[in-house]
Amino acid sequence: MMAGRSFLAGLCALMMILGTTSCADGSSSRAIVVLGTWVGEEQQLFEGILENFENATGIHVEYTGTRDFSAVLASRIRSGDAPDLALLASPGQLQEYARDGRLVPLDEKTDRIEMDRIHEEYSPAWLRSGQASDAKGKERQFGIAVRGKRKNVIWYSREAWRRSGREEPRTWDDLVRVTEDIAADGPLAAGGQPWCAGLRDSSSSGWPGTDWIEDILLRDAGAETYQSWYEGTLPWTSKPVSDAWLAWKRIIEIGAPETAREMLLNGIQYGEGEMFGNPPECYLRRIGYLATNVYRSHADDLGFFDLTPAGGGPRNVEIAGDLLTMFRQSDHAQELVNYLTTVEAQDIWVKPGGAISPNRRVTGYPDDSTRSLARSVNDADLENVVFDASDVMPVAMRTAFHQAVIEFVAAPDRLPDILGNLDVVRCDAYPHDANRAGCS
């Protein structure tokens, strides 16, 4: 519990000067209420960070974690009981709440949130993820990422790869050939398959498939088209989007007809042990940031790669993250926001694996793979970093996207109808003043 003492000691001294808390006796006024999605191990880790803050400042924090976050948050807002702070996993949600005037800007002039320090320490891409227009159309910093994730990478066992004599794929065509080679080598007869893939999730089945579609579209069509798509101006029935779905279909149907059907039955955890057998039951897994946590016991054997864009040039980097937002303004809430962005707090987050820090000065990563993921974001040019598209979409659009993945894998020949239905949702889900092609 000693992490963060240097920052917190200074914070405590400042607060005593300002007269906002006594620090020594642990007294404070009303507790800060924080709502988020973290439960289980993630909740325990976060509560450990909060305990450091509480012990040093005397400010009490009550955290509630729930898998039904969106519904709980909406219900509390309707009843007039909004939390002080909420950890949104979606810039789309942030933009909606900012547009409705629900959020407090974090870039207000205050001594308690050190925006100059945050701008110096944070990668610009992470800062951009928390920006949105307020009710008057002014761009403000309504959220700050406190826990980051790198997406659009593919994981494998280095040892299994070495035994097979294969090289890492560099292009999409390479990836297709490798998938075909693994299928042709015969592991399917022994119950194995090229891809460790599952779409079933208790909270949101289908989301692993959305990652595939996003990555393919980003790689083939580029960041500008990708942005037009998630902003709702590019129809789902357009050729770039349709081609991305068809490219994914080509991958998941390689090897055996039942491969796609098995994806519907497998949970998202499929591949956690199967990838490291001898021989493996599956060889490749597209799981993004989760791998360094899921495969913690295989960290030395874990490798990853991403693919070059279809037209060459620098790779596009896809990220996701948890955005700290403020629904009720108070000095104590601002002080907690500031602390959670510091190196001291962020170091605690990243040590167990499974996350990267938006703060570029954090160095306490548990393994080379996680360190490399963080570096890939920090070293990328701003124009080559994009946020997970489904996370930026309005909630109704994102939910329909997840469901469409399930429908497509079950019946790929229905793709035109599936995409047409997504366009119906698009025309209703986005603000009606947006330039929504094909919407009346």
Image (cartoon, rainbow, N blue to C red):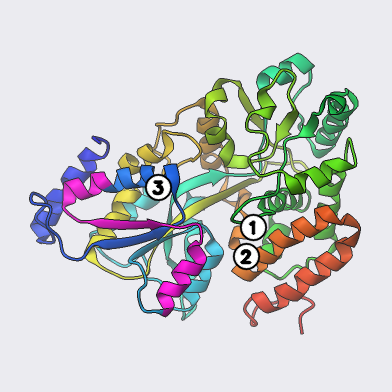
Residue pointed to by mark 1: 389
> Three-letter amino acid code at disc 2?
Met
| Relative depth, front residue between 111 and 271 | 271
Q: Which of marks 1 and 3 is in front?
A: 3
Q: What stretch is highlighted in magenta?
A: 51-78
Q: Residues within 10 Å of mark 2 (few under 14, many from 20)?
A: many
Instruction: Report the quarter where the N terminus lies.
Output: top left
For this view, does 169 lie left or right of residue 376? right
Q: In this view, does 222 lie to the left or right of 65?
A: right
- How many marks the image carries: the answer is 3
Q: On residue 130, which mark appears?
A: none
Residue at image point 40% right, 47% down:
43
Residue nearest the observer in this picture, 135 or 149:
149
Identify residue for label 2.
393
Q: Which residue is drawn at 14% across and 53% down?
A: 14
Q: Where is residue 233 in the image (x, y as percent from the top left)?
A: 71, 71
Give the residue pinned by disc 3: 43
- Amino acid at pointer 1: Ala
